[in-house]
Amino acid sequence: MSKRVFIVHGWEGFPEECWFPWLKKKLEEKGIEAIVPAMPDPGAPKIETWVAQLEDAVAAPDEETYFVGHSIGVQTILRYLESINARVGGLVAVAGFFTLTDDAFDDEEDIKTAKPWLVTPIDFEKVKANCPAITAIFSDNDPFVPLENQALFERELGARTITVSGKGHIGGNDNIFEFEPIFDELMAIVNK
């Protein structure tokens, strides 16, 4: 079995955005296969279609399968993990959330799109059983993800959490095209 990492972008994201190409290249330089699937209809993400897309991309999950998600991509991975009957290697969750700030929404359509992600329960026990190593990275000035999510990730998922300073939503809008903590935390999980 060879190691594979699936990098899942967020709402309005795409595979070539922000730090995704950089992380993919760094992983491939280490001999690790890195896949950044283009998620369907990124402007209006739906749980069913995003989880199905990830399921198709992964095909056969195993302990050599790892995940990195950004924002709603983290939610997608968690919902995928609760749906499988296999143990994976681990997850690095970047700007993941269970709650959002009011600033996260531009209009009523955004609120309607986000609502299922915020109110549909996740089976945290199943996620933890399938994914024993979770690290979550937050920024102290994320305009969309309040820091209360850090405690939620710790309590609900037993995640190791890290808060960085001044990195916003840790994505393309913040001009973050390289971000060493993501690679370092993933390598710590991969090399356990």
Image (tube, rainbow, N blue to C red):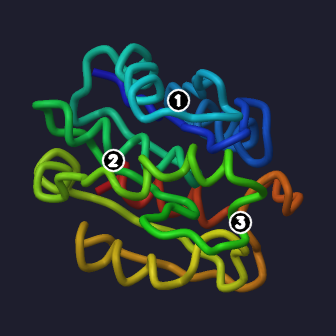
Reading the image, the residue beneath label 3 is 169
First in residue order: circle 3 vs circle 2: 2
Mark 1: give few (<14), some (14-19) or many (20+) Cα within 10 Å.
Answer: few
Residue kind at label 2, given as amino acid type: Leu
From this view, report whether residue 45 is shown above or below residue 127: above
Circle 2 sits in a helix, a strand or a loop, which is it? helix
Q: Where is residue 52 in the image (x, y as percent from the top left)?
A: 38, 20
Residue kind at label 3, given as amino acid type: His
* Residues tagged 3 and 1 counted as in contact (Cβ below 8 A): no
First in residue order: circle 3 vs circle 1: 1
Which quadrant of the structure image shows residue 76?
top left
Reading the image, the residue beneath label 2 is 78
Q: Position of residue 44 (x, y in %)?
A: 64, 34
From this view, report whether residue 173 is shown above or below residue 20: below
Q: Position of residue 97 (x, y in %)?
A: 48, 64
Circle 1 sits in a helix, a strand or a loop, which is it? loop
First in residue order: circle 1 vs circle 2: 1
